[in-house]
Amino acid sequence: MSIRHGLLALLERGQMYGYQLRAAFEESTGSTWPLNIGQVYTTLSRLERDGLVRPLPESEAGQRPYEITDAGRADLALWFATPISRTDRPRDELAIKLALALTTPGVDVRSVVQAQRSATMRALQELTRLKYGSNRPEDLPWRLVLDSMVFQAEAEVRWLDHCETSLVRHQPSGPAPPASRPDDPDARDAARWAGEEARR
Amino acid sequence: MSGSDDAVLDLRAVHRTHGVGPAAVHALRGVSLVVRPGELVAVMGPSGSGKSTLLALAGGLDRPTGGEVRVEGQPLGALDRRGLAQLRRRRIGYIFQQLNLLGSLSALENVALPLELDGTSGRRARALAMAALTEVGLPALGDRFPDQLSGGQQQRVAIARALVGERRLVLADEPTGALDSQTGEAVLHLLRRRIDAGAAGVLVTHEARHAGWADRVVFLRDGVLVDTTAPLGSVEQLLSGSDR
C-alpha cells in the first residue's frame, strides 16, 4: 500500500481536495499513518497521469477537488479483490538482525531478544490502551486498524519467545559464544541454527 | 528493597522451593514485585517459569520458603490459617480458568457465597452480589443456574464473585481460557475497569495480546524475573506520541 489506493477509496465516497483527503486518510487510519500534504499532491498527480482521477474546476476559495474516474473505480475494485501478497511487504529487519546477532562475536543475543520483546510488548500495551479508549460505533474502522497492529505485535512477541526458548536449548551458557571457537559444541550448534534460519 | 507504603501487593525476595536435597525444584528464586492501587501487572513466561506459583503466593494460597508476601501492608506469614482465610475472603478476588461455580447455586448465590461465609448478612450479601452482577453486565441473570448460562456468561459470574464487596487485590490466572477473542476481550475490559476504579491486579497469561491490557508486564523465566516493561503514560501522551 498504497497511499494511492487509500486516496482512491476516499474519492469513491465523493469528490475531495487535498487537505480533505489528508484529514480523511488520517481519520480512517486513526492517525497511525500520518501523511504530509506533499505526499497527497504527488500521489494525486500520479493518479491523474494514469487516468484514475480527474481534477475539477477550482472553487472560489482556490481549492481544486478531484473525482475518481471509471478506470480508477476498476483499479480500486481490483485492489479490494486481490489479497496482499506477503512477498510484497518489506523484509523483516528484526529477523535479519537476530540472525546476524547470532553469528556476530560478542553479541548477547538474549539481551537483544529481551530488549526487543520489552519494546514490542510496550507498543502492544499502548495500542490496547488506545483501543480501550475508543468504544464509539464510529470508532470501528480505527479499532480494526489497531487490532491489526495488536495481532502483529502479538505474533512478534510469540516469535521472540520462540527465539528465546531455542536459544536456551542451544546455548545453555547464556551469551553467544564467539563464533571463532569451532571446537565448542555450543558454538557449533548456534552457528548451525543461525545457518538454518538464514537459509529459510 | 522496592517496598512501598501504598502497595496493595508487595513480594519481597520471595523463594518457593518444592522438595529438598538434589530433587528440590526451585519454582521461584528471589522474586520482588510491588503492585499499587490502580495498577494491573501482567506476568508472562513459558510453562514452568513460576507464573502460577507467584499468583498462589500472592493470594495466600501457598506460603513462600523464603522472603515475604504482604497484602495491604499485612505480612501474610504473620497470619494464622483463620486470619489468612479471612483476608482471602474479604480482600482478594481470584479469577481462574477453572470457574469453580457451584452448580446447585444460582448465579446470584454463587457471587454472594464468599460474603455469606464471611458473616455478612444474607440480605446485604445479595445486594452486593447484585451490584457485582450488574458491574459485569448480567443484572437480569441472577436467578439462572450455571448450566443455564453460556461459557462467557459463566466467566462473568466468576468475575463478579471475584470482584464482589471491597476486594482490593484481584488475581487472575489465564482468565480468558477457552473463550473466543471477543468474549475474552470483554473479560479483560471488566478487569481493567475495576483496576481503574482503584483495585490492584495481577494477570498471569501466556498471550501477549492479553498482557497488553496491563500497565506493566514482567517476564519470568526459571523462577526469576528477567525483564519488565516501564509503566505506561496517559492516553493523551500516547496519542501525541503515536506518530513515532
Image (cartoon, coloured by chain):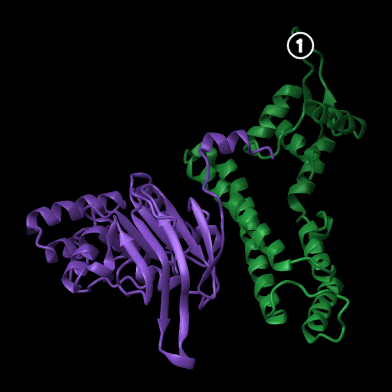
Residue at disc 1, secondary structure: loop
Q: Quadrant of the C terminus of chain B?
A: top right
**Which residue is labeled 1 in the image?**
A59
Q: Nearer the viewer, residue B92 or A131?
A: B92
Tell me what residue is drawn at x 65 percent, y 57 percent.
Answer: A152
Which of the 4 image quadrants contains residue A53? top right
Tell me what residue is drawn at x 53 percent, y 34 percent.
Answer: B236
Question: In this rendering, would B200 be left or right of A188?
Answer: left
Residue B129, placed above or below residue A33: below
Which kind of residue does numbered mark 1 sit on? Ser
Q: Nearer the viewer, residue B169 or B213?
A: B169
Q: Quadrant of the N terminus of chain B?
A: bottom left
Which residue is most to the bottom?
B22
Image coordinates for residue A169, horizontal then vertical, percent: 68, 81
> Is residue B91 visible in this depiction of the protein?
yes
What colour is chain A? Answer: green
Residue B58, placed above or below residue A63: below
Image coordinates for residue B138, horizontal then vertical, percent: 28, 54
Image coordinates for residue B168, horizontal then vertical, percent: 29, 53
Tell me what residue is drawn at x 29 percent, y 49 percent.
Answer: B135
Which residue is most to the top?
A60
Residue A167, placed above or below residue A48: below
Which residue is most to the right?
A49
Tell me what residue is drawn at x 86 percent, y 29 percent.
Answer: A42
> Is residue B150 visible in this depiction of the protein?
no
Which of the 4 image quadrants contains residue B57? bottom left
What colour is chain B? Answer: purple
Question: In this rendering, would B94 be left or right of A29?
Answer: left
Circle 1 packing at 10 Å, graded few (<14), some (14-19), many (20+), is few
Image coordinates for residue B139, horizontal then vertical, percent: 24, 51
Mark 1 chain = A
